[in-house]
Image (cartoon, grey):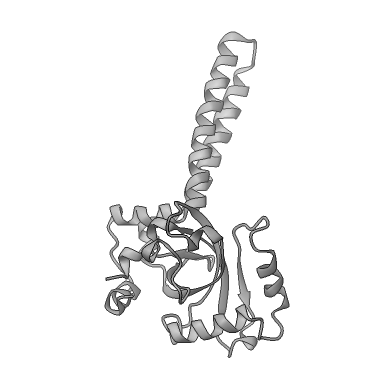
């Protein structure tokens, strides 16, 4: 990991070119997939509505409702997708992978899959790899008392996992605010196409304290 690149990326406001920002949006793959589904679904529904209107005695309001609902759904999903401006303002942290889909450890796999990561927005520790690694190892080994809810989530990871971001009580982590987030990882943008041995992956923290993995090209040599 190139420390100079990482330090430069940590400065805000940063200036990520629009063409490079596409990597982040692709890396947030689950949301991108739903945007495509909603858009295609809206087109299909609108087409069916028009056919019904011209060939069957269906009221025009049915066509309008179909089209409006499809458009509304697309706009909502588009709103959830981060803009380039937001990417340039999100704080950067080094995340530690607690759990991940097995395919993300196989460099021959072409995949977008989920992971469970911890990180902090605390200025003193958010870029401290050693600190987050030590904490991550303690959590993985279930050595911290009072985190039973998190250990249960780790045990259940992969069985219907979905977007989440939870706060870990700071009293249990040395009075440092920690977040645990479900993060989509894309093998195309991981270092050497796999989760690294140290389990460290830089990520941006969005307004909902959800992690967004940074593509390796931004911080590797």
Residue at the image position 67 percent from the left and 74 percent from the top: 150
- In the figure, residue 173 lies in which quadrant? bottom right
Q: Position of residue 218 (x, y in %)?
A: 31, 66
Establish if 140 lies above or below 175: above
Closer to the camera in the image, 137 or 47: 137
Residue at the image position 54 percent from the left and 18 percent from the top: 50
112 relative to 9 in the view: left or right: right
Q: Position of residue 68 (x, y in %)?
A: 55, 32
For this orientation, the residue located farthest to the bottom is: 174
130 relative to 17 in the view: left or right: right
Establish if 7 lies above or below 24: below
Residue at the image position 38 percent from the left and 67 percent from the top: 89
Quadrant of the snapshot with the C terminus: bottom left
Residue at the image position 69 percent from the left and 64 percent from the top: 156
Establish if 192 lies above or below 10: above
Closer to the camera in the image, 160 or 203: 160
Q: Position of residue 8 (x, y in %)?
A: 28, 75
- In the figure, residue 83 lies in which quadrant? bottom left
Q: Position of residue 110 (x, y in %)?
A: 44, 51
Task: Please state the total of marks drawn on the protein image.
Answer: 0
Quadrant of the snapshot with the N terminus: bottom left
193 relative to 38 in the view: left or right: left
């Amino acid at each position: 990991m190139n420390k100079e690149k990482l330090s430069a990326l940590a400065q805000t406001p940063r200036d990520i070119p629009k063409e490079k920002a596409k990597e982040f949006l692709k890396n947030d793959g689950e949301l991108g997939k739903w945007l495509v589904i909603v858009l295609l679904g809206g087109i299909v529904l609108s087409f069916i509505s028009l056919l019904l209107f011209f060939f069957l005695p269906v009221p025009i309001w049915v066509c309008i409702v179909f089209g409006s609902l499809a458009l509304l759904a697309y706009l909502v999903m588009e709103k959830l997708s981060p803009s380039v401006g937001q990417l340039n303002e999100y704080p950067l942290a080094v995340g530690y992978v607690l759990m991940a889909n097995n395919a993300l450890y196989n460099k021959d796999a072409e995949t977008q899959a989920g992971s469970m990561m911890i990180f902090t927005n605390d200025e003193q520790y958010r870029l401290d790899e050693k600190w987050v690694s030590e904490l991550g190892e303690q959590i993985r080994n279930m050595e911290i008392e009072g985190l039973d809810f998190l250990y249960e989530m780790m045990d259940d990871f992969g069985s219907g996992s979905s977007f989440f971001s939870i706060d870990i009580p700071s009293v249990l982590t040395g009075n440092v605010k920690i977040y645990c987030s479900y993060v989509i990882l894309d093998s195309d943008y991981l270092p050497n196409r796999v989760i690294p041995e140290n389990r460290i992956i830089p990520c941006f923290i969005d307004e909902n304290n959800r992690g967004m993995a940074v593509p390796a090209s931004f911080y590797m040599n």
